[in-house]
Amino acid sequence: MRNLSLIDQVFVEIDEAVRTLAANKTVGSFRPDKEYSDDHMSLQTKTLSGKLIRVNHCGEVCAQALYRGQKLISKDKKIKDFMEEAASEETEHLAWCGSRLNELNTKTSILNPVFYAASFTSGILAGIAGDKFSLGFVAETEKQVVKHLDKHLSLLPEEDIKSRVILEEMKKQEEGHKESALANGGRELPAAIRRIMSTLSKVMTKTTYWI
Ligand SMILES: [Fe+2]
Ligand SMILES: [Fe+2]
């Protein structure tokens, strides 16, 4: 592929951001082995599930932005390929959460653009700190995501079997992203940075639950 100029890259990133935020990335909806009906779910249960899935949808918006930012900065083809591959699974997660939100009649978070911008900037900064740091950043992010998904799996209403199947599948793949980042040379991040990441993700999860 030809080398893109800086201006080209800016336009590519704007296009990616717009498509992510407009939920316009076409990779289809999640197709579990069997069909799940929501007919047995009460309105109250659907509302609770919708709030939880909205948080996860925003998490996937952030994942897109993080990987885009990191890929943009890295000069190493192997690292760029790794980011690209992980990002394509994140694109599926984004679509699964997006279509599940529709099924639950819940809107995406109005804060998505804010968290996209913040995550893209974090990805750029992690990239500037070097590939080993950047991969360590992926590993730490995914570790925190898995912990968060475990919490959401425990909060999800028993009746919402389809959302559970989706979150469990996502969790499996996020664990895979963590392992690959470590296998590719990711190093452990300083405790202070891990704490900042955890605080920022709490801000995201607590706000997008409501709006
Ligand atoms: Fe994901
Ligand atoms: Fe991931």
Image (cartoon, rainbow, N blue to C red):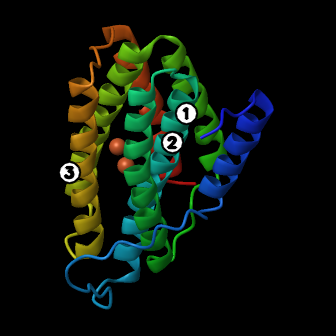
Which residue is nearer to you in this view: 31 or 104?
31
Mark sitting on residue 119: 1
For numbered disc 2, what is the local secondary structure?
A: helix
Above/below status of 173 relative to 8:
below
Above/below status of 47 relative to 4:
below
Query: Which residue is disc 2 drawn over?
Result: 62
Query: Which residue is disc 3 drawn over?
Result: 172
Q: Position of residue 62 (x, y in %)?
A: 51, 42
Q: Position of residue 42 (x, y in %)?
A: 34, 83
- Is ligand 1 closer than 8 angstroms to the Cβ of mark 2? no
Question: Which of the two discs, 1 and 2, labels the residue nearer the N terminus?
Answer: 2
Residue 48, picture quadrant? bottom left
Q: Specify few, some or many for label 3: CA neighbours under 10 Å numbering under 14, 14-19, or 20 or more.
A: few
Amino acid type of the residue that numbered disc 1 sits on in the rendered structure: Ser
Callouts 1 and 3 close, C-beta under 8 Å: no
Question: Which of the two discs, 1 and 3, labels the residue nearer the N terminus?
Answer: 1
Specify the farthest residue to the right: 7
Left or right, residue 202 beside residue 144? right
Q: Residue at 76%, 42% (x, y): give it.
A: 11
Left or right, residue 8 beside residue 121? right
Q: Position of residue 170 (x, y in %)?
A: 28, 55
For numbered disc 1, what is the local secondary structure?
A: helix
Work out whether residue 69 can be spotted.
Answer: yes
Callouts 1 and 2 close, C-beta under 8 Å: yes
Amino acid type of the residue that numbered disc 3 sits on in the rendered structure: Lys
Q: Residue at 67%, 41% (x, y): give it.
A: 13
Left or right, residue 148 beside residue 137? left
Spatial CA distance of label 3 from label 2 is 18 Å
Residue 135, picture quadrant? top left
Spatial CA distance of label 1 from label 3 is 22 Å
Q: Specify few, some or many for label 1: CA neighbours under 10 Å numbering under 14, 14-19, or 20 or more.
A: many
